[in-house]
Image (tube, rainbow, N blue to C red):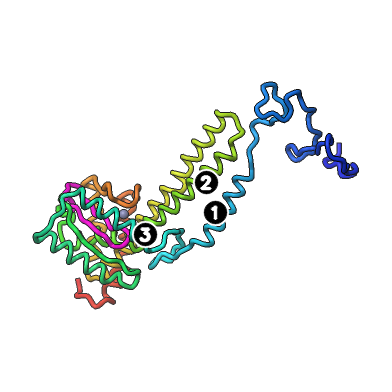
Amino acid sequence: MPRRRRSQPRRTIGFPYRRPFRKRGRLEPRPAPGPYAGQRGSPFGGVRRRGRLRLWPILLFAGFLAWYWLSHREEVPLTGRTQLVDLTREQEMALGLQSYQEILAKSRVVHSGAELEVVRAIGRRLAAVAAAEDPGFEWEFNLIDAPQANAFALPGGKTAVFTGLLPVARSDDGLAVVMGHEIAHAIARHGAERIAHQKLARYGTLAVGVAVGEMDLQTQRMLMGALGVGTQFGVLLPFSRRHESEADWIGLLYLARACFDPREAPRLWERMGQAGTGRAPAELLSTHPSHETRVRQLEEWMPKALEIRAASGCEPL
Ligand SMILES: [Zn+2]
């Protein structure tokens, strides 16, 4: 049998002529319509073909993805990585401010004392050297009385340190390592990028949901489950880890520019690893590289950081 029956004359009459349909690349005549022809979900099978993947939602999503990629690309300062962000700076800063006010309202904020002064002084020193990449953040540094060994910086420069970090940080240099890392997250717009990824993941899930909508329920569930796991482990989590590494690198540069001791960075993350912390509810990102990876990378970057520090007119270490 020839693969394509091109020689067959094209008939132009309308009803009841039905076009042959394509099945696995071959043209075959349509099955004869049953008594329930045309009725969706006919109990006797009818003409409804089950188990078929709809392609159009996937193509539509692919087109959207291409448009989204082309129209929402930004470059991360200091690393040159291309990222996807669709919030404006103003939207991002407004979101950051709102979250900050909510967190501070629910927390025990330290209003005075030497520790607060240290946090503010380190913050100002780091923000000053981030000026070249700073799009006009209104920096604010607060100390929250809470046991977790962490800190956060929200879009717009709203930063807070938890008192639980102070004993792990041990020194100004140690505290600057964590604050520089958090400031780097804000400068690199990681929060806004994560929002864009989550939006794409939602749209992608919706597209696939429509694409498999005609398949039997069990297959649908299986495919959607696999997609969820694939998105989480194949896209979202690797991006989170990339953000962490990027914040480590930018934070290290800020330490060097601000004349802190960059060599404290691997030591600090080692201590954080031993303390079994490194995550806080307000941390912008959900997963982190292992402390070993982090320490190894920081050691690799150290010669460059020390070079930058020397070139920044700092006192020798
Ligand atoms: Zn982080």
Residue 230 seen in the figure: yes
Say which residue label 1 marks: 65
Quarter, ligand 1:
bottom left
| Quadrant in which residue 119 is drawn | bottom left
Residue 309: give x, y in percent of width and height.
27, 72
Establish whether ligand 1 lies closer than 8 Å to the Cβ of label 3.
no
Q: Which residue corresponds to the image point at 33% horizontal and 61% vertical from the top-left?
A: 93
Stretch of the chain drawn in magenta: 146-165
Q: Amino acid at mark 2?
A: Gly
Q: Is residue 55 left or right of residue 106?
A: right
Q: Nearer the viewer, residue 2 or 6?
A: 6
Q: Which residue corresponds to the image point at 25% horizontal and 65% vertical from the top-left?
A: 139
Residue furthest to the left: 113
**As drawn, 299 above or below 219:** below
Image quarter in which the C terminus is found? bottom left
Q: Amino acid at mark 1?
A: Leu
SS at badge 2: helix
